Amino acid sequence: QVQLVESGGGLVQPGGSLRLSCAASGSIFSINYMGWYRQAPGKQRELVAAIFSGGNTNYADSVKGRFTISRDNAKNTVYLQMNSLKPEDTAVYYCNADGRSTFLTRFGSWGQGTQVTVSS
C-alpha cells in the first residue's frame, strides 16, 4: 500500500506564493506519474500539473507560467511551486501518484488534500 501526504497549503494574499509538497511512502517499487489536482467548492476536480518519470510535464492552461511542478525521485516527493496566486486558485489541492508496488502490482493513490486560500 502506498500513502501520499501533502503539506504546504495555507492562506496567502493575491500575488503571493506557496510551495506544496507531497511525499509518497510504503511499498513503492517505482513511480511513473505524480500530479497535482484541485477542487474548488461546487466544481469538479481538475488537473493542475503533472510530471512523469522521464521529466515530462503537463500544466493546465490557467496555471502555465505561474506554477512549476518538480519531483525528487530519491525522496519519492513531488512539489508544486505556485507564484502570482489569484483568488481563483483557491481550492483543495490533491496529490496523485501512479506506479508499481514492491509486489509489482500497479498502484494509484491520492493524498488527503491541502487547502489553499488566496484572499486579501
Image (spheres, rainbow, N blue to C red):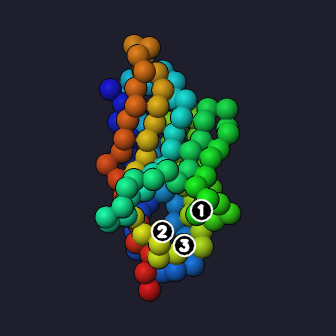
**Foreground pick, 94 / 6:** 94
- Residue 82 at least partly seen: yes
Count of numbered circles on the image: 3
Q: Residue at x 42, y 69 (%)?
A: 90
Q: Which mark is residue 74?
A: none
How far apart are labels 2 and 3 at the CA level?
7 Å
Q: Residue at x 44, y 14 (%)?
A: 104
The image position of residue 117, as x and y in percent, is 40, 72
- The Cα–Cα distance between marks 3 and 1, rounded to whole angstroms, is 9 Å
Residue occupying image coordinates x 52% and y 75%: 86
Q: Quadrant of the N terminus?
A: top left
Q: Which residue is mark 2?
A: 89
Q: Is residue 13 left or right of residue 112?
A: right
Q: Secondary structure at mark 2?
A: helix
Question: Hey, which quadrant is residue 63 in on the image?
Answer: bottom right
**Residue 85 has which mark?**
3
Q: Nearer the viewer, residue 63 or 117?
A: 63
Q: Is residue 42 left or right of residue 13?
A: left
Q: Earlier in the sequence, mark 3 or mark 1?
A: 1
In-front residue for pair 49/101: 49
Asked if labels 3 and 2 touch by Cβ distance under 8 angstroms, the answer is yes
For label 1, the residue is: 63
Spot occupied by residue 43 in the image (x, y as percentages of width and height): 36, 61
State whether residue 7 appears in this view: no
Q: Residue at x 61, y 59 (%)?
A: 61
The residue most toward the top is 103
- Residue 101 falls in image quadrant: top left
Which mark is first along the chain, 2 or 1? Answer: 1
Q: Nearer the viewer, residue 39 or 75?
A: 39
